[in-house]
Image (cartoon, helix red, strand yellow):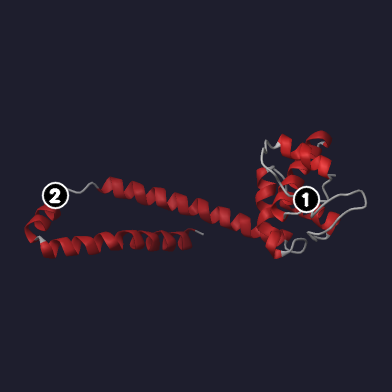
Amino acid sequence: AVQPLMKYASLYLLIILSPLMVYSLVQAREQPQEACVAAAAPVDLSTGRQQTDDLTASLAERLRYEEQLSAQLEEIAPLVPPEYRMMVIYSSQANGLDPHDLAAVGWVESRWKTDAVGSSGEIGLFQILPSTGEQIAQAMGLDRPYDLRDPATNIAFGAHYLRTRVNKQGSTE
């Protein structure tokens, strides 16, 4: 894991530093005297080293996040159509839920059919009653109109509702 990270860090530094090097070469050609004076000035390498260390740490964090995201997407793939996977991941993260649990609820409630309507008037992917939707919107602090048929809204509301059920019951069981 360290070897690819160093490859990306080096590539990233090259991308960042290349324009600076080109600019320096152009300046040196246009103003050779000033370029020589600037080249002779002392350089503080600790700043560059700190920036490299910060960049490496940032890239390592990003790599861990992408590996985790990839694993979560792979885990829910059998349950969630591709167009909803990222919404499920983000909504589960926002509500402190396991993405697999949220995916399973969506599968059971509607088989991921956006036009699903239940026998009691439940709407959308997570089969949310309009009255429950109003309560969820209020709890989420939404003061704008919402549409329970919209997949992003329905997934976000479903995740919020599942979180409240978990809080009351202690688990998703």
State the residue at coordinates (82%, 57%): 107
For the residue labelled by badge 1, is the local secondary structure a helix, a strand or a loop? helix
- Which three-letter amino acid code belongs to the residue tagged 2? Ala
> Residue drawn 16% across and 61% down?
27
Disc sitting over residue 41 in the figure:
2
Locate residue 146, reporting x and y percent: 71, 46
Query: In the drawing, what numbered circle is on residue 101?
Result: 1
Residue 171 falls in image quadrant: top right
- Write down the quadrant of residue 114 in the picture: bottom right
Q: Residue at x 47, y 54 (%)?
A: 59
> Mark on residue 66?
none
* SS at mark 2 in the image: loop
Quick check: can you spot residue 171? no
- Tell me the quadrant of the picture where the C terminus can be found: top right
Q: In the figure, is residue 146 to the left or right of 67?
A: right
Lower position in the chain sequence, tag 1 or tag 2: 2
Numbered disc in front, either 1 or 2? 1
Q: Residue at x 10, y 57 (%)?
A: 36
Residue 131: percent from the left, percent from the top?
83, 40
Residue at the farthest right position? 119
